Amino acid sequence: MIDQVRSHFGFSKMPFGKDLSPSALHRHEGHREAVARITFLVAEQAIGVVTGEVGSGKTVAARAAVAELEASRHTLVYLPNPAVGARGLYGEIVTHLGGEPRFHKAALIAQATELLGKESAERGRRVLLVVDEAHLLDPGQLEELRLLTNA
């Protein structure tokens, strides 16, 4: 089916795929506003939520905002599915920062905090945590993320 669509329209690859470069995105007003809000959150080192209808481009806006950042000054931790529990959130952060997650949650929290601190103090990089599908976070996970902002 995909090959038929490609040949019919003369596509060398399918348009609108997830591998589409942020520079090739259609920058309509809603997209520009979402990117500006995300960029503001990064600059202010703040917690924020981008909301919108399903398919409105929230994830695409996050990708576009991150693509505009200076890569040498930022470290991205992207969580596509937050339904991993609080321990899973810490494990993902530790893994993204190059660590091997410890088994016990208390040790994992300390490890995540330590790695976040090192990323900032030793490497001079700001860590950006992007949680896609954040509406799936439970209150406990939200509190864990809030507590991590102290790091």
Image: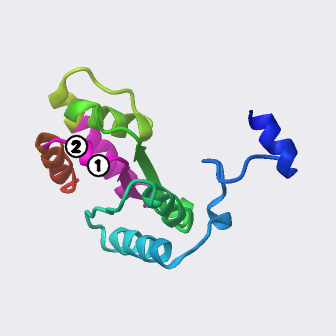
Q: How far is disc 2 from disc 1 in space, using C-alphas?
A: 5 Å
| Residue situated in front as seen by the camera: 131 or 10 | 10
Q: Which residues are magenta?
A: 110-138
Closest to the observer, 13 or 104 = 13
Q: Residue at x 51, y 58 (%)?
A: 60
Q: Amino acid at mark 1?
A: Ala
**Residue 75 appears in view:** yes
The vertical placement of 48 against 19, above or below, is: below
Q: Is residue 27 above or below residue 122?
A: below
* Corner quadrant of residue 47: bottom left
In the rendered structure, are the residues bearing label 2 and label 1 in contact, judged by CB atoms less than 8 Å apart? yes
Q: Quadrant of residue 140?
A: top left
Residue placed at 19% from the left, 22% from the top?
A: 104
In the rendered structure, the answer to whether residue 100 lies left or right of residue 134 reads: right
x and y percentages locating residue 117 in the rendered image: 30, 51
Image location of residue 65, percent across then percent down: 49, 66
Quadrant containing the N terminus in the rendered view: top right
SS for tag 1?
A: helix
> Residue placed at 36% from the left, 35% from the top?
92
What residue did someone put label 2 on?
A: 137
Q: Nearer the viewer, residue 116 or 62?
A: 62
Q: Which residue is mark 1?
A: 134
